[in-house]
Image (spheres, rainbow, N blue to C red):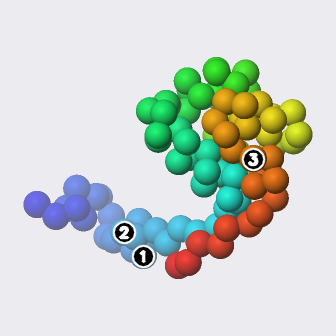
Amino acid sequence: MSVTADCNHPPTPNNVTRNYRRRATTVGARLLRIALRAQHLTITEAALGTDIEYSQFYRYLTGRTRPGLEPALRMQRAFGVPPESWLQVLKIRD
């Protein structure tokens, strides 16, 4: 059975494949992701441990926003991510 057999409408480019634009992220976000994997922490556990709201922590982790000084220092103490790494942009190849 194919994937399109379950749909009630014919496939179009929008519902078959979605091309997500890869965004540039920060070095800090990448280092934070590596630290969470190394410590076997979930996003929820990491956010609770640093006293940062889950949704805001997720934005930092994905590189959508950059933390201010206080959250950056909290993450440095908890995970070893230097605050200046949040200012360095890491380009992702398509």
Where does the N terminus fall, quadrant-wise? bottom left
Crowd tier of the residue under label 3, counting other residues whose Cα lies within 10 Å: few below 14, some 14–19, many 20 or above: some
Q: Nearer the viewer, residue 6 or 63?
A: 63
Please indicate whether residue 91 sits to the left or right of residue 8 in the image: right
Question: With respect to residue 69, does 87 lie above or below?
Answer: below
Residue corresponding to mark 3: 82
Marks 3 and 1 sit apart, C-alpha to C-alpha, by: 42 Å
Label annotation for residue 13: 1
Contact flag, marks 1 and 2 (Cβ < 8 Å):
yes
Report whether residue 59 is seen: no
**Extreme residue in the left direction:** 1
Marks 1 and 2 sit apart, C-alpha to C-alpha, by: 5 Å
Q: Quadrant of residue 93?
A: bottom right
Q: Residue at x 28, y 58 (%)?
A: 7
The residue tagged with tag 1: helix, strand or loop?
helix
The residue tagged with tag 3: helix, strand or loop?
loop
Residue type (three-letter) at the residue carrying disc 2: Val
> Can you give x and y, in whole percent of width and height, for residue 62 in the image?
63, 51
Marks 3 and 2 sit apart, C-alpha to C-alpha, by: 41 Å
Q: Nearer the viewer, residue 82 or 42?
A: 82
Residue type (three-letter) at the residue carrying disc 3: Pro
Please indicate whether residue 5 sits to the left or right of residue 73 in the image: left
> Can you give x and y, in whole percent of width and height, for residue 78 in the image?
67, 30
Residue corresponding to mark 2: 16
Query: Could you tell which of marks 3 and 2 lies nearer the N-terminus?
Result: 2
Tag nearer the camera, 3 or 1: 3
Report whether residue 90 is seen: yes
